[in-house]
Image (cartoon, helix red, strand yellow):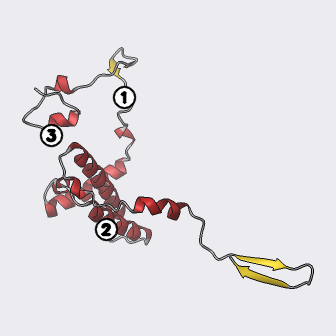
Amino acid sequence: MRESNTLSDYFQDPINRVSREEAMRHGNEKTEFETGAHRDTDEGKGKPSLISPVLIHRLGVLLSKGAKHYGADNWTKGMPFRRTLDSIVRHTFLELAGDTAEDHAAAIAFGAMCLMHFQEGIKSGSLPASLDDRNPGLKKILPSILTSPPSEPRIEIRACFACGRAGYEPR
């Protein structure tokens, strides 16, 4: 059997599966509970218990509607990043406008979930890298757009104390 890089490899590769014992990873640090039970540390493993149950419920409702229309797990096949990001932006503007025709916040969360899933899929090789059709040129201009001061016209008032004339110049 081959060595597994991640626990998800165990579930995604039915041909070269490793046993659950082989797939489990244990750190050197352990936690002892008041009951005497021991467990490896949960450091760096994330805290899914901190995810809002409202998010889980509303996202689940949206996914259920999508499964009826497109088929269960259709979204896991991957979509171009720009198509997903366009949807997030549209739903963001509709949410900002107060539109209540659909659950825009859940749609935004769905889009974010898709992007994360696609990124991991590309990294693991289970999805094609061509899905990442983002514009790399934006990386160059975004810092100046997002951090520049507002572009309001400035007027500098000048006065000549020798002759008493005053004037202004746009800057």
Q: Which quadrant is the N terminus positioned in? A: top left
Residue sitting farthest toward the top = 36
Q: Are marks 1 and 2 in contact (CB under 8 Å)?
A: no
User: Reading the chain from its start, which is encountered first: label 2 or label 3?
Assistant: 3
- Considering only vertical position in the picture, is 63 above or below 165? above
- Considering only vertical position in the picture, is 85 above or below 164? above
Relative to 115, 128 lies left or right: left
Residue matched to label 1: 42
- Mark 3, secondary structure of its residue: helix
Residue sitting farthest toward the right = 162
Residue matched to label 3: 12
Q: Are marks 2 and 3 in contact (CB under 8 Å)?
A: no
Residue 17 placement (x, y as % from top left)? 11, 31
- Give the class, few, some or many, for how many residues have Cα within 10 Å of label 2's Cα (few <14, many ≥20): few
The residue at 13%/58% (across/down) is 71
The residue at 19%/45% (across/down) is 125
User: Reading the chain from its start, which is encountered first: label 1 or label 2?
Assistant: 1
